[in-house]
Image (cartoon, grey):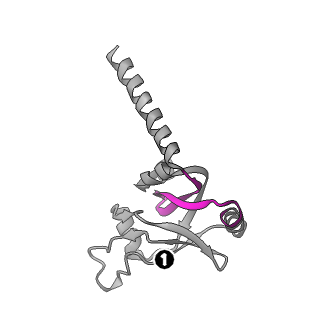
Amino acid sequence: MAGNDKEKTVAFNRRASHDYFLEDRYECGMVLTGTEIKSIRDGKVQFKDSYISIYGGEAWIKGMHISPYKHGNQFNVDETRDRKLLLHKDEICKLHQNVRLKGYTLVPVRIYLKQGRAKLELALAKGKNLYDKREDSKLRDAKREMEKALKLR
């Protein structure tokens, strides 16, 4: 049953690596309803304007949009409701300390399916300044030019 170990990326937050320096990454589960997991399997999920907050000793993702399942009828729930993240207590405490004391942000990076379950990868991130973003785009352009020159050669 080696085929069940594969991960299928459903959604990726490209904006996160553009706006933040992504340092530590964590895998966590999500508390979802049946129609939400069906929509995620169909790829109907967006990260736009979503963020992760910690309160009451629990981690929550806010603003993540999961489209209603087309065959869900009355079982569909609000698309942008807050969803609880499943992390160990010590991980939550560590993340909360870094966010509160060191000025980090928790950013959702991607959603993927692992052994039939939806997992969220979140990152502990530091915000980039404008000159950092410019430097990254220069490096990306230079790398693209080198690959182009090697391809033509």
The answer to whether any part of residue 37 appears in the image is: yes
- The span picked out in magenta is 99-128
Give the residue displayed 47% in from the left and 74% down from the top: 32
Q: Is residue 148 above or below residue 91?
A: above
Residue at the far bottom in the pictured view:
74
Give the residue displayed 69% in from the left and 64% down from the top: 91
What is the secondary structure assignment of the residue under circle 1? Answer: loop
Residue on which the image places disc 1: 82
Percent of width and height locating residue 152: 32, 17
Q: Is residue 146 above or below residue 13?
A: above
Residue at the far top in the pictured view:
153
Give the residue displayed 54% in from the left and 68% down from the top: 52
Percent of width and height locating residue 76: 35, 80
Disc 1 marks a residue whose amino acid type is Asp
Q: Main secondary structure of the magenta part?
A: strand
The answer to whether any part of residue 1 appears in the image is: no
